């Protein structure tokens, strides 16, 4: 990922998020947000950008308006330095040494000079917030995105600080403008003071990021754990607190909306109680187990549903069983008294389990056989991820189960939140999987979908896109942030030699939590419930047969996705 925003807003929903006090969209800031997002997508360098960053302090030396607080429209930090951006969204003019807005044909004087504003914020950061990095390069920029005045013609007065629609129309991007200002400011200061600026290192970038956006660990009233509320945050804390007071909660949500994070917070709240965490996917089980150990949830048992039933002694249960046979075996088994009892049970990826006798297990293992009516249960599912797995419609099962639960639906994806094309591709696949192979779809998502006539050609492209950057120590792309998801039917012994690259190893339960710089592969179905920043999805021509697996693969990506379609 080349650019990360704080907060990480959905790029296609900014008009509903970035608002004025009167509830209307702040069009200027929205325009700048999208410019930065679009222009930095393919950057080889890492950028961290904050929007609407507030500090309860202000520079004492550069504070002409005697402000007690600083409110920065955008803060951009990269290896070159630190850039403070002030945005004015109206039609800005400059007369008699003063800036004005033109509103309905009338000039309205600005209460504050934007150049002095942004300069003050720059020094606030330098003197009050990031004193440790005061020797790094700090710059300030004003952006008037809807103004058609070329302020660069008056460099003696404004220098190269103001970016307007004029530069944009000339083909000068905002990032080009900022980069040029970094260079000009650096040369000017270095020539004048015989001083050399040092770039901000990757470790320093991470340190600054953590300073400006610390984890919300103070929100957790149950245990001081950094990761519990990564997703929950301020806005969702009240929702979590309210739901967690219910004995039985069913959460239905799209991939990446935070269901698993919610589950771990739920477990944190009950750490003194005996719990059971069940999922269907073996790799997910091992990752959850790792996160449970991090939290020191010693009373929480983690297992896959199938393995747990086998461990209980159900006997001849098999993956080859039909759904009816599977359910009958579970029902027959749980007519006997089960000695194991739990204070609470969490079911993750429940869409894969719901029609396999899960209600019999829940009734037997909680509240002395009254689990669905009086037990403490958390059930997490996504009906779309069960699409076409079986001939049954699990929505009916969800509706029946919800009679006993507080039913909550989560609609906002926090995985891939800053890349709407991932969500749009997933929606297209669900609506009509054949659309993925059309030229119109490829044109709509350029450089995201590739067609190949052979494994060899696909492999060559994947080496270029993933393996070489991972191997290159000067590239920020790392194996731990990537996954190759290969359609299950393509992962035959014969195909692996042709398709899988050297130095690329299979993802297993022993390395699923490993963070070394190694590129790994598995199938989308085995990776269900997991996620990576960057995903390469290798599939056959889209059909109703592989529709579900393609959908699952797409929704595993957090930031970047490339799809390689094999026509063989």
Image (cartoon, rainbow, N blue to C red):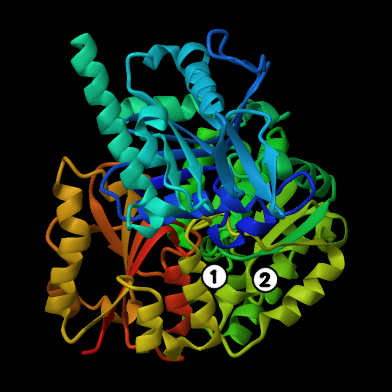
478 sits left or right of 549 in the view = left
SS of the residue under disc 2 = helix
Answer above or below: position of 28 versus 562.
above
Q: Is residue 25 above or below residue 403?
A: above
At a point 14% along the width and 77% down the height, the residue shown is: 457
Write the residue at 21% across / 17% down.
Answer: 190
Residue that label 1 marks:
315
> Mark 2, residues whose alpha carbon is within 10 Å: few (<14), some, or many (≥20)?
some
Q: Residue at x 36, y 41 (%)?
A: 153
Q: Which mark is residue 333?
A: 2
Q: What residue occupies the far front of the structure in this picture?
A: 96
Q: Is residue 213 left or right of residue 167?
A: right
Residue 112, position as x, y percentages in the image: 64, 28
Q: Is residue 510 visible?
A: no
Q: Residue 518 at what x, y percent from top left?
A: 23, 49
The image shows residue 523, relative to residue 419, as above or below, that is below
Q: Is residue 170 visible?
A: yes
Circle nearer the N terminus (2, 1): 1
């Amino acid at each position: 990922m080349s650019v990360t925003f704080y907060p990480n807003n959905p790029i296609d929903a900014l008009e509903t998020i970035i608002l004025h006090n009167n509830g209307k969209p702040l069009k200027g800031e929205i325009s700048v947000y999208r410019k930065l997002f679009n222009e930095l997508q393919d950057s080889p360098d890492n950028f961290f950008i904050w929007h609407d960053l507030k500090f309860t302090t202000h520079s004492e030396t550069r504070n002409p308006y005697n402000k007690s607080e600083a409110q920065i429209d955008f803060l951009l930090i990269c290896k070159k330095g630190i850039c403070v951006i002030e945005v004015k969204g109206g039609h800005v003019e400059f007369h008699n040494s003063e800036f004005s807005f033109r509103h309905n044909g009338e000039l309205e004087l600005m209460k504050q000079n934007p150049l002095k504003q942004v300069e003050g914020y720059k020094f606030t950061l330098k003197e009050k917030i990031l004193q440790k990095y005061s020797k790094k390069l700090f710059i300030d920029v004003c952006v008037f995105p809807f103004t058609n005045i070329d302020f660069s013609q008056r460099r003696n007065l404004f220098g190269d600080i103001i970016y307007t629609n004029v530069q944009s129309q000339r083909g000068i991007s905002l990032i080009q403008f900022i980069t040029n200002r970094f260079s000009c400011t650096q040369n000017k200061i270095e020539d004048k003071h015989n001083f050399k600026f040092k770039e901000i290192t990757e470790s320093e970038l991470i340190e600054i990021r953590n300073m400006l956006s610390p984890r919300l660990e103070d929100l957790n009233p149950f245990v001081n754990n950094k990761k519990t509320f990564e997703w929950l945050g301020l806005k969702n804390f009240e929702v979590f607190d309210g739901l967690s007071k219910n004995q039985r909660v069913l959460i239905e949500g799209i991939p990446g909306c935070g269901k698993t994070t919610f589950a771990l917070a739920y477990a944190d709240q009950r750490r003194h109680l005996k719990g059971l965490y069940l999922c269907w996917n073996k790799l997910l089980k091992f990752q959850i187990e790792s996160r449970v150990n991090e939290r020191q949830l010693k009373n929480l048992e983690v297992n896959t549903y199938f393995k747990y039933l086998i461990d209980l002694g159900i006997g001849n249960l098999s993956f080859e069983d039909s759904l009816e046979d599977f359910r009958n075996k579970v029902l027959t088994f749980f007519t006997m008294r089960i000695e194991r009892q739990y204070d609470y049970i969490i079911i993750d990826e429940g869409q894969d389990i719901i029609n396999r006798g899960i209600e019999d297990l829940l009734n037997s293992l909680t509240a002395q056989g009254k689990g669905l009516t009086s037990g403490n249960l958390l059930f997490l599912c996504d009906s779309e991820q069960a699409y076409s797995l079986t001939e049954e419609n699990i929505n009916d099962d969800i509706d029946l189960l919800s009679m006993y639960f507080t039913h909550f639906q989560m609609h906002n994806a926090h995985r891939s939140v800053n890349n709407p094309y991932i969500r749009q591709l997933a929606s297209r696949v669900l609506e009509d999987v054949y659309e993925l192979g059309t030229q119109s779809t490829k044109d709509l998502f350029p450089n995201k979908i590739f067609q190949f006539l052979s494994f060899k050609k696909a492999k060559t492209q994947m080496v270029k896109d993933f393996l070489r950057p991972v191997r290159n120590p000067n590239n920020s792309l790392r194996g731990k942030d990537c996954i190759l998801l290969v359609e299950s039917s393509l992962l035959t012994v014969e195909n692996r030699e042709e398709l899988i690259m050297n130095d690329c190893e299979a993802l297993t339960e022993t390395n699923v939590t490993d963070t070394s710089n190694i590129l790994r592969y598995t199938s989308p179905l085995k990776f269900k419930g997991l996620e990576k920043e960057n995903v390469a999805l290798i599939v056959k021509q889209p059909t109703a047969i592989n529709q579900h697996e393609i959908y699952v693969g797409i929704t595993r990506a957090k930031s970047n996705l490339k799809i390689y379609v094999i026509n063989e």
